Image (cartoon, helix red, strand yellow):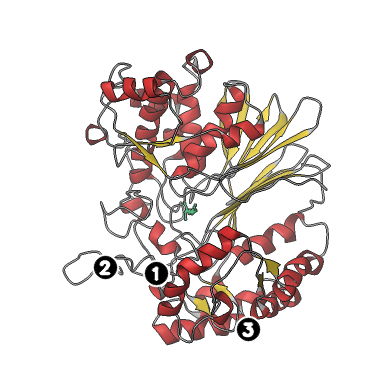
Amino acid sequence: MTLNSSSTFLLQFHIRMHNGQSYSLDFREKAPALAGRNMYLDSSANVIKRKSLDGIMACAVPGSVMGMYEAHKRFGKISWSQLLQPAINLAENGFTLSKTEARKLNRFAALFTKINDPEPAFLLSKTGWKEGDIFINNAMAQTLKLIRDHQADGFYKGITAQKIIAVMNRYGGLISANDLENYRALWRPVINGQYHQLKIISMGPPSSGGILLVQMLSLLQDYPLKQWLWNSARTVQLITEIERRVYADRSKYLGDPDYYHVPVETLLSTDYLHSRMNNYHTDRATESSRIGAGSIPVSEKEETTHFSIVDPEGNAVAVTTTLNGSYGSKVVVSGAGFLLNNEMDDFSIKPGYPNTYGLLGSEANAIEPEKRMLSSMTPTIVEKNGALWMVTGTPGGSTIITSVLQSILNVADFGMNMQQSVSALKFHHQWKPDTIFTERGALLPADSLALSRMGYHLLNRSPIGRLDGILILPSGKLEAGADPRGEDFAIGF
Ligand code: DON
């Protein structure tokens, strides 16, 4: 993206213009107006398995097109149609599938067929997709042309909207023409924080990412991490205890700020944060069952992608955007060439019932008509001594926030460059389950043993995060880090 003046977004879109001014755009999906608190429960109030994840009821009102349009309207330099043309060409002429993409499409083929009638031909290959096959999506090209010619109205009104409504009618979904027409992307206050001489600029509610990141970094400032070394038992223990506490706060206090009073100021205040560490012991684990959210008086009112960009003028953009799970709800809007999200699962569908990432929630993130569901997306921009220093972010559900934290600490405290920081093995704790998840090899056996002896439960898991970051070196040169866990790459123009 190119920007028209000297100066930051976040989203789920965060931009810092080279004059130091930052902006954050929320194009988070919304619950349909007909959504209700118990829509995923049966008559005995039990959760109906996967209803919030697969199929029509999982879909929330889409936000991405409006987000891109709004960002362009405010900061775009080249024309909207020029901006869309490369995507139209890719949809029309096709692109070459990688091995991972081919395998993933084949893995989901049965589900695409089960959920959609007629079958979404463009997603299926009779002989099975192979690496090197050309993936063409003519219907998507038509949709993109409508968006090119009619801006956001090309999606939220007219033919595309009618196609979305036709799918809703066919399967009994809740999204209405009004829901689409009324969708707005919103400019939100950015979340600011401090870590030594670094200024953190990140995404506020309805994302939990910025607040949790700033809470963690504020607490970490009091400890000599550099001296304790990267992923040593001490370092991992401290970070785990901090992660446990902030994720407990997330479950209680964070939600859509338009529906729930999120006590941002208290959550970020030094006194509150220090009080949360009163029961931290350097020699043993604090069990999550003994940690709740902090006590804050509350008044009554109340398939993820990340990219980081820095342009020649020094403007920086961090964007994280998502359908939630792989291929979202797997519902294809027939004739329009795209899938709908399954973002509804990011709500707390029943108090105490974990979402697909194991995250818990309550009132703050309960389903309400037209409310935005809580996110973990953490597009982040960091300044050092007033100048742009790092742009970072990642997919990964609940692990997004702790991965972004590690991407910053790895450079600020542990002397890594951007690529090393992105590639470095990661760990993650989210309060519940009470487990330190680790990538295989992230901790030395002696450190794992020391932590087990202190009472921690450690578990190896699949790769954590797919970070993409840019570091601005003192010389002004840009150093990029693209995550080897995915097919990510860094490119300069
Ligand atoms: O907004 C959120 O927090 C989730 N919907 C993000 C999902 C995600 O990162 C999936 N990618 N791995």
Mark 1 secondary-structure assignment: loop
- Please tell me whether residue 269 is drawn above or below residue 157 in the rendered image: above
What's the distance in space between the residues labelled 3 and 1, CA to CA?
26 Å
Q: Residue at x 22, y 71 (%)?
A: 42
Q: Nearer the viewer, mark 2 or mark 3?
A: 2
| Position of residue 219 in the picture relative to residue 88 (left or right) | left
Q: Which is more N-terminal, label 1 or label 2?
A: 2
Image quarter of residue 383: top right
The residue tagged 3 is: 158
The residue tagged 2 is: 48
Q: Amino acid at mark 1?
A: Asp
Q: Which is more N-terminal, label 3 or label 2?
A: 2
Q: Residue at x 48, y 59 (%)?
A: 324
Q: Residue at x 29, y 37 (%)?
A: 434
Q: Nearer the viewer, residue 428 or 136?
A: 136
Q: Which is more N-terminal, label 1 or label 3?
A: 1
What's the distance in space between the residues labelled 2 and 1, CA to CA?
11 Å
Image quadrant occupied by the N terminus? bottom right
The residue tagged 1 is: 54
| Position of residue 380 in the picture relative to residue 325 (left or right) | right
Q: Amino acid at mark 3?
A: Gly
Mark 2 secondary-structure assignment: loop
Q: Is residue 34 something one can see in this rendering? A: no
